[in-house]
Amino acid sequence: MALELRQNLKLTQQLVMTPQLQQAIRLLQLSRMELLEIVQQELQENPMLEETQVLPDEQKERDALNDKDQGSKLTNEEKEMVNNADWEDYLGHFSSTSKQTGSREWEVPEEMQSYEARYSSKPSLQGHLLWQLFLQSFTDEELMIGEEIIGNIDSKGYLKSTTEELAETCSVSESAVESILRKIQNFDPVGVASRDLRECLRIQLTALNETDPILMELVNEHLEDIEKNRLAPLIRKFKISKELMKEYIEVLQSLDPFPGSSYGTEDVVYISPDIYVYKYEDDFAIILNEDGIPAIHLSTFYQNPVQKGNNNKKDNDYILEKTRSAVWLMKSLHQRQRTLYKVMESILKFQREFFVHGVSRLKPLILREVAEDISMHESTVSRITTNKYVSTPFGIFELKFFFNSSLTMDNGGLVGSESVKAAIKKLVGGENPQKPLSDDAIANNLKKELEVNIARRTVAKYRAALNIPSSSRRKKFF
């Protein structure tokens, strides 16, 4: 068979992920703090973007003049993009207050105002201990041993090295290490640098001048029994009353099993809601959180040289490229906020009973229902609800919270799994501590209250998800 070259035409359809489309998709799934970082970074890197501080009406006039002068330097497509880029107030167009309250004198409640947390950094556990160490009248060798001990304490306050290892590292005797260790264990917080829980509790009891032999034996021999709530055998063993055992347990509960935890180095993460939903008369107001997000627009500083022809072609091409990038960013931000508002509006429509009565009235909902309601793809709804939070009359929730599976009721209806979890939490909260409800009893109560058939293992799964211990762990003897 002879080899030959041929030219063939083939018509195919292909989805091309342009950089602009990738940017728009990436912005959808960013959290609010990540979005702020992206906008601030673009403001620093793109000279065609600037943050506006002028009033909206003044900015519109500036943009109108700017667009008119720049038209001769852009293509038809670029003209349309720039002429329609009225982005300085892109967040404000989707506030339901303008549509629902009209000319009412409706002020934003004081608790809605979101201020960034301002707090000084906590001292670290090691720093706090070193400060106390250098206040002591120690020799240089003792200071060296103390520094080595403090350097081997974990975040919970426990010593992670043996005295033998510390002695070898410092080239001293184990007795010297033990001597300094006992002094450090009485630093603030008391019990730090302990090697196990029993030693930690013993040191704290000694500091409180607690010398009761029964209490000491409870710490040395029966911590596991106390943890598993096996108190009846202990009462019989020590031949004491329930009231006295209760006092012993209260003393042990007053101690700190993790003395270093209050000096954790992790920063507190505060959630800043992306949306606020407030009840106003018989309706709800949806407000996008604009606090801290800069209002951006196209800069005129670099456009004037292009209009006057003072730059060469390379400079003009650079400015036009940055202009396109700036316009696409503003368009993506505008689309993100519009999508977020539409999704929240749809969630409010499906879950209106939740916003009126609370978690117990949360209905089953899936992403597809919201996607069909707002005529968007399901993946878009999934991205826009990721790492987004809404402030409601019943607290702050992630948007994913409103999407939950369903359980079938006796009358054929459906109830949301989150409503069942809320009912379980309520039942456990109202139970008799001395006779806690078993999983079977909880299932029977749910059948009476919610008319839903639920298996015992499902109750156990939901209980575990709520961090509720089993009935044997919840039982109180006093």
Image (cartoon, grey):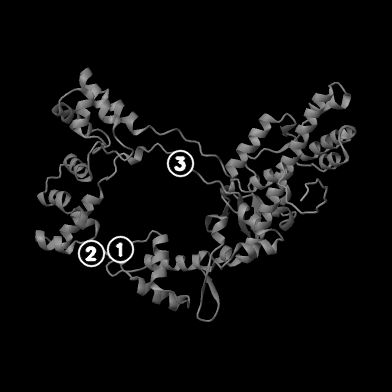
Describe the element under mark 2 as helix, strand or loop.
loop
The residue carrying mark 3 is 268
Q: Residues within 10 Å of mark 3 (few under 14, many from 20)?
A: few
What amino acid type should be assigned to the residue bearing mark 1?
A: Arg
CA–CA distance in space, label 1 to label 3: 30 Å
Which disc number belongs to residue 474?
Answer: 1
For this orientation, the residue located farthest to the top is 140
Which disc number belongs to residue 477?
Answer: 2
Q: Residue 140's image quarter?
A: top left
Of 7 and 464, the residue lying toward us: 7
What amino acid type should be assigned to the residue bearing mark 3?
A: Val
Q: Position of residue 55 (x, y in %)?
A: 76, 37
In this image, 424 relative to 104: left or right?
A: left
Between label 2 and label 3, give the one nearer the viewer: 3
Q: Position of residue 366 (x, y in %)?
A: 59, 64
CA–CA distance in space, label 1 to label 2: 10 Å
